[in-house]
Image (tube, coloured by chain):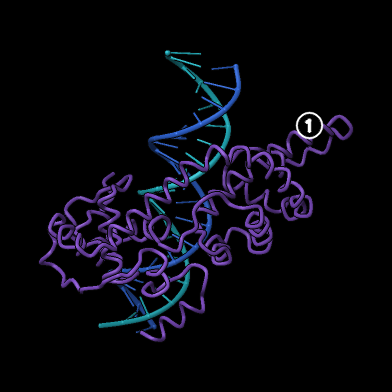
Chain colours: A purple, B cyan, C blue
Amino acid sequence: MCNNSSAGGAMATTRKGPWTEQEDAQLVWFVRLLGERRWDFLAQVSGLRRTGKSCRLRWVNYLHPGLKRGRITAEEERLILNLHAQWGSRWSRIARKLPGRTDNEIKNYWRTHMRKMAQEEKTKKKGTAASSPSSSSTSATTCSASATDTTSLATTTTDALQESTSMVDDEEATTSAREEKKEVPLYCAAVEMDQLWNEIAAAEIYPDMMMSWGCSGQVAVPVVEPTSPAWEFCADYSLWRIDDEEYYNNSINTL
DNA sequence: AATCGACGCAACCGCCGCGCG
DNA sequence: TCGCGCGGCGGTTGCGTCGAT
């Protein structure tokens, strides 16, 4: 099914799948140029053969300079548990309380977390099943990873929240071992993004990039000289910061 | 060394709400 | 008031990686 985006307008062929480095750089550039809105328009003028939605998602979940990279910390994990107990699957809302984390990231984390918890619950129950065989309340024991299961598990999580804090500590020990292995690639990913930002920040490459994208005639390119990459840009230029709603509102007002 | 399964993550899909003409 | 387009959100899928066997 070639789902040409209805909102995408008259794009010849819409690309799908993983983003290339060049696409990333291109997207970053045009977001700087046009701001984080009018995604369909941005997708069109940028020459990216992507839908606006896809561009937005890529930006929000991966390219945004304010993103925190690396594993979810124990502190964040507790927060997620708490907030999920409060709000349920309002991932974007939860994400706003976790600076630098995206709803997608938290959502993914929750799924795997719940899978783990469900399995632990299962093994626990198996351990105690001999004493109470009739308590087959399937809510917490179905270890399938479907979303419906996780939501039903959320209620048990609410109950298990106090317990979970200790579980978090236990899990932290087990995950930290894994973390050692994972840290390298994650760090590398962060470095790659920094490199990307550095490259983009290097003013001299702009013309080359524009030429190579073949869209130099489509938009007027302002001479913006970013003094430093990601973080400064985030503070000074970006309309949206994950961790600061007030900043966002102020930015909107000043525009 | 090869295979298999679990896990983690990026990306897509469909629905919904809001703003605008 | 209504219809349309766009952006945002939650759910789901697909794929790459890694560890166990």
Where residue A216 appears, as percent x and y from the top left, is: 12, 64
Asked if residue B2 is positioned above or below residue A25 in the image, the reply reads above
Asked if residue A18 is positioned above or below residue A155 in the image, the reply reads above
Residue farthest along the right direction in this orientation:
A131
> What is the secondary structure assignment of the residue under circle 1?
helix
Q: Is residue A42 left or right of residue B12?
A: left
Q: Is residue A111 left or right of residue A155?
A: left
Residue farthest along the left direction in this orientation:
A217
Q: Is residue A13 left or right of residue A160?
A: left
**Classed neighbour count for the residue bearing mark 1: other residues with Cα under 10 Å, few (<14), some (14–19), many (≥20):** some
Where residue C15 appears, as percent x and y from the top left, is: 38, 36
Quadrant the C terminus of chain A occupies: bottom left
Q: Amino acid at mark 1?
A: Lys
User: Which residue does the image show at 66% across and 60% down from the upper left?
Assistant: A79
Where residue A238 appears, as percent x and y from the top left, is: 38, 72
Asked if residue A224 is positioned above or below residue A195 in the image, the reply reads below
Tag 1, which chain? A
Q: Which residue is mark 1?
A: A126
Q: Quadrant of residue C19?
A: top right
Is residue C12 or residue A108 the one in the foreground? A108
Quadrant the N terminus of chain A occupies: top left
